[in-house]
Amino acid sequence: MTDLLDHDTLRLSRGSVGGAVSVWGASLVGLDVGGHHLVEPVAGAARPPLAAGATLVPWPNRVEGAAWTNGGVVKRLEVSEPPTGHALHGLLSGVRWDVARQGAAAVSLTSRIRHAPGYPFDLDVEVAYSLTPAGVEVRCTTTNVAPSGRAPVAIGAHPYLRCGETPVEDLVVAIDAGAALALDGDGIPRGAFGTAGTPHDLRDGVVVRDAVPHACLTGLATRGGRARHVLADATGRRTVLWADEVFGYVQLYVTDLMPGRPAAIAIEPMTAPPDALRSGHGLRWIAAGESWTVRWGIEDEARAPAR
């Protein structure tokens, strides 16, 4: 059975695959296959550091100035990134979710949004983690429970990937993206450009220490309805983050702020780009009573079925 560990972390197990999920932000805080880490193992922290593994809803990344316009009316969100004045990582990444169902190899967590400041909509959200023979599959379902009206929604996740014990800075990251957004110093898009011939071209792989530390990539290649983002070690072993093709954007974030690590890399699948509430790009408008489910996952490529 699933055990409740220190500080509200749930442990999952399926054969040689182990996982850990924090109720804070419905966050993936551990995943290993045969003792080979696929994400940064931060299980046991009081709250996941640097939004590690968090679910980002109803928007990923940032809203500039924590304000947007809906129907001609300015909506003011709470500022959650004080240095910039922006609203960061949606409304549920820092809250405690409820455990709805749990088993040895799977757990579902739920949360709700009810007319939050600057976001006057009613949503129920469920995130379900299920271990597979190669890693984990994640399903996020968002339901508009209001009696009428549509709600703008975008979804993301914030996992920090690993490929075993190799120092992250020595790994190779590969993302098959033909375009990137031009981010300003605060991470807000100010245009777009093709990645060919630029440091943002990760299609052939780049050593993490040489990668652009903060980027938003799009124009993602898909196969079988999925995009695949890879972190590999020198032996050719590969951690793969896959996502439904509705995740048309991926945020890359390389940081030296992860406790106990000289470097960490977040590869964040997103259904919309930064500042989506303001731009409207990538938003899904969910009708009253409608649900929207998206899927992503992480796997050890050597254990994954051929696709």
Image: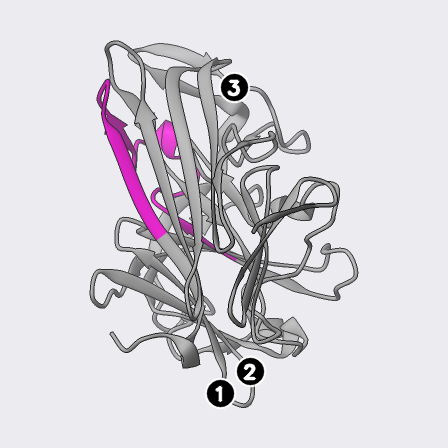
The colour mode here is one colour
Discs 2, 1 touching: Cβ within 8 Å: yes
Q: If you read the primary sequence from the N terminus, does the residue marked by circle 1 or circle 3 appear first?
A: 3
What residue is rendered at 63% in x and 61% in y?
A: 40
Find the magenta span and give its range: 267-295
Q: If you read the primary sequence from the N terminus, does the residue marked by circle 3 or circle 2 appear first?
A: 3
Q: Is residue 33 magenta-colored?
A: no
Residue 34 image-quadrant placement? bottom right
Q: Is residue 135 above or below residue 10?
A: below
Q: Is residue 277 magenta-colored?
A: yes
Image spot of residue 143 (x, y percent): 31, 27
Q: Which residue is mark 2?
A: 233
Disc number for residue 236: 1
Left or right of 239, for residue 169: right
Residue 126 image-quadrant placement? top left
Report crowding for label 1: few under 14, some 14 to 19, many 20 or more residues within 10 A (C-alpha).
few
| Disc 3 element | loop
CA gap, disc 1 and disc 3: 45 Å
Report crowding for label 2: few under 14, some 14 to 19, many 20 or more residues within 10 A (C-alpha).
many
Disc number for residue 77: 3
Q: Which numbered mark, 1 or 3, is in the foreground of this view?
A: 1
